[in-house]
Image (cartoon, rainbow, N blue to C red):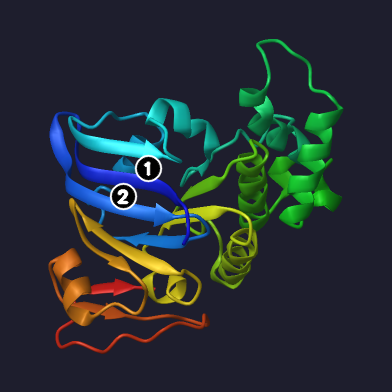
Amino acid sequence: MKNEVINLTHVWAKYNKVPILEDVNLTINEGDLVGLIGPNGGGKTTLFKVLLGLIKPYRGTVSILGNTVRQGRRYIGYVPQLVELDREFPVSVAEVVQMGRLGKRRLLQRYNGKDENIVNRTLEQVGMLELRDSSIAELSGGQRQRVYIARALASEPRILLLDEPTASVDPQRQRSIYELLKELNQFITIIMISHDIGAISAYVKSIGCLNHRLFFHGDPPLSTEVIEQTYQCPVDLIAHGVPHRVFSNHDFPLHYHE
């Protein structure tokens, strides 16, 4: 039996006084690779903020590895959707990854040999060790995303949250990011937000459909009815160049997810 790493029970949460999550019940087990889908404004990022302790639910309970959010969030690594760095700021790949060690040291404590070993190890895990001394500004979108994933891994998390991990990556490089996450999932639980339903269905172990309420959480494939209930309109799925599970076609598609 797999160990439970995240549990949300009857969770309600607001953002700017507007209810975003409504009676969400979700259990994620150790070693899972979850794709979280749903329309913009449906609560996916809010759910991440609840897990990170940035938003406190006004109803319901949340546990992370059996702990409260305040205690359990130290086990979470996070890769936000958009990471903008000043291209003129002279920061190397290794220095960006070192930022992931900040929470592991006392204030003003210098980086030590252990930190350096972890930086190198995580860069190797994401295939970026040879570029450790390169400027982050010189990298492609896909390479930068790998560095940001390495930064999250440098905190030695047991759970990795990724918000649209391929949003800034060209289509040719997206598959390599998904393959990387599949490899990392061998030793870490992963939850990622994505609008790329067709693509992620080839890589995730389970899918959660969230639109204020959780309409579905289970193994792919999804039914047409559940997807359309989540997006509240007919949905047609299109994938380009990425292996995927195929969902049935619909008449009069209004949403396209590439």
Query: Taking the image as drawn, is residue 41 in sight?
Result: no
- At x 48% / y 43%, what residue is drawn? 80
- Estimate the spatial distance between the alpha carbons at disc 2 and disc 1, rounded to whole Å: 7 Å
- At x 53% / y 59%, what residue is drawn? 31
Near-viewer residue (206 or 148) = 206
Q: Secondary structure at mark 2?
A: helix
- At x 47% / y 81%, what residue is drawn? 240
Residue 254 image point, x, y percent: 18, 75
Q: Which mark is residue 120?
A: none
Residue 89 image point, x, y percent: 69, 29
Q: Is residue 176 above or below residue 145?
A: below
Residue 242 lies left or right of residue 218; in this view the side is right
For disc 2, the neighbor class at 10 Å (few under 14, some 14 to 19, many from 20) is many
Q: Is residue 132 above or below residue 114?
A: below
Give, as a three-letter code, the residue at label 2: Lys
- At x 41% / y 34%, what residue is drawn? 52
Q: Is residue 92 above or below residue 108?
A: below
Residue 6 image point, x, y percent: 39, 46
| Name of the residue lying farthest toward the front | 1
Q: Is residue 150 above or below residue 182?
A: above
| Name of the residue lying farthest toward the top | 108
Give, as a three-letter code, the residue at label 1: Phe
Residue 56 lies left or right of residue 33; in this view the side is left
Q: Which mark is residue 48?
A: 1
